[in-house]
Image: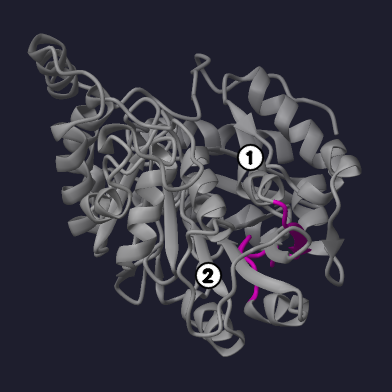
Amino acid sequence: MSTPINTLGPRRVIPLNANSLTSEEINAAKAVLDSGFLTMGRKVTEFESVFANYIGAKHAIMVNSGSSANLIAAFALADGFLKTGSGKRRIQPGDEVIVPALTWSTTVWPFVQAGAVPVFVDCDPATLQVPPEAIENAITDKTRAIVVVHVLGGAVNIPAIRAIAEKHGLWLFEDTCESLGVTWNGQQVGTFGDMGSYSFYFAHHITTIEGGMVVTQDDDLADLLRAQRSHGWVRHMSAGAHHAAETPEIDPRFLFVTTGFNVRPTEINAAIGLVQLSKLDQFNDRRRAVGLRHDQMLHRLIQRGDLSVMSFDAQCAPAPFGYPVICRSREDRNALQSHLEAHGIETRPVICGNLARQPAMKHITHRISETLSGCDTVMDRGLYWGTHPLMTDEDVDYVVAQVEAFFK
């Protein structure tokens, strides 16, 4: 399809995301610098408490990225220190973990690094989410955990998947890095499973520049995550004094009860996060308004079948991370992407597409459950552009005009 000449007025630049940091965040960061207390401390603890309260979780453990949140969650489920129950078993080398094929790489890599075999399941290309029946069909006697991803500001049918996990005695982990503030029937996603992760990367629903969080209702898991975050150290564990009493011959200041990493955040990240979190609801309200305006203005092209767009379950209150579309063919997708980029509209593929097709998987033991045709559709024919909260109605109008011009 040929690219039309732009007769739509001055060229605009529509980024995937815009800088939402204001003088409030800058002053909060400056106050930390002025204080001289920079490494993980009181601000991190405060942000964890406020975040846990907002989400509706008993515990929130802050780390330096969403990927690190996934990392410590995966290794917690494989840790010999893990307390098990309800039929759940620790992940050991060769055990299987069910994962979506439509995801970001660091949803899967930590479980591979912990020794598990990822079992890929398909998505519904209409919603981009994993259907519960795909997970049920992938379970074997080797399965130890289910990992779901709430994709691009939507949500999986998480109550149905939790029921499957409980039925089979499996751990349930929710990667919520793309869906902060999204609810299912009024409950925050990320709080249905044993653990949930969130990302505060610059392009996400709120930002701490870099940062992430793991939430859980489980006291023992929370303590293990705190140890995993800091070298396997007891320093930040609520049970630290108990462990010190059990090993009196070792200085409790340098006492290690398990393995771990150094994925701690800084006080600056937390100070920024506290300000950003207070704005999350208004950010997400605007994301929904931007998404709805796109839907309304692209209605004719959607009805004609030139594009299909992401749909949401009636019980999901979304917060669009971007505006994903699926074209009729790979050729149309490539041409539309080139057209939009040429007119200043930044685009991206829909996450990693079908992760099982990525070259890295040639070196990783894995299993594919049934077909991944939905993920192939998304990978071959999908793309998305921004729906960030600073996007104006005029920005949306410009994007829609360029999409319409392409399909003319």
Q: In this figure, which colouring scheme has been used for the structure?
A: one colour
Mark 1 or mark 2, whichever is nearer to me: 2
Residue occupying image coordinates x 40% and y 54%: 224
The residue that label 2 is drawn on is: 172
Rendering coords of residue 163 (x, y %): 52, 86
Is residue 116 part of the magenta span, yes or no?
yes
* Kind of residue at disc 2: Leu
Position of residue 240 measured from the top left corner of the image (x, y, whole percent): 26, 49
Residue found 41% across the figure and 76% down from its top: 315
Q: Which residue is drawn at 42% across and 38% down?
A: 204
| Gap between marks 1 and 2 measured at Cα | 42 Å
Classify residue 53 as left or right of residue 194: left
Residue 6: in sight, yes or no?
no
**Looking at the picture, does residue 323 appear above or below residue 396?**
below
Residue 136: % across, % down: 69, 82
Identity of the residue drawn at 33% across and 49% down: 247
Q: Which of marks 1 and 2 is nearer the N terminus?
A: 2
Confirm whether the magenta stretch covers residue 215. no
Residue 37 figure quarter: top left
The answer to whether residue 209 is above or below residue 95 is above
Q: What stretch is highlighted in magenta?
A: 115-131
| Residue at the spot of label 1 | 404
> Can residue 50 be seen in the rendering of this structure?
yes
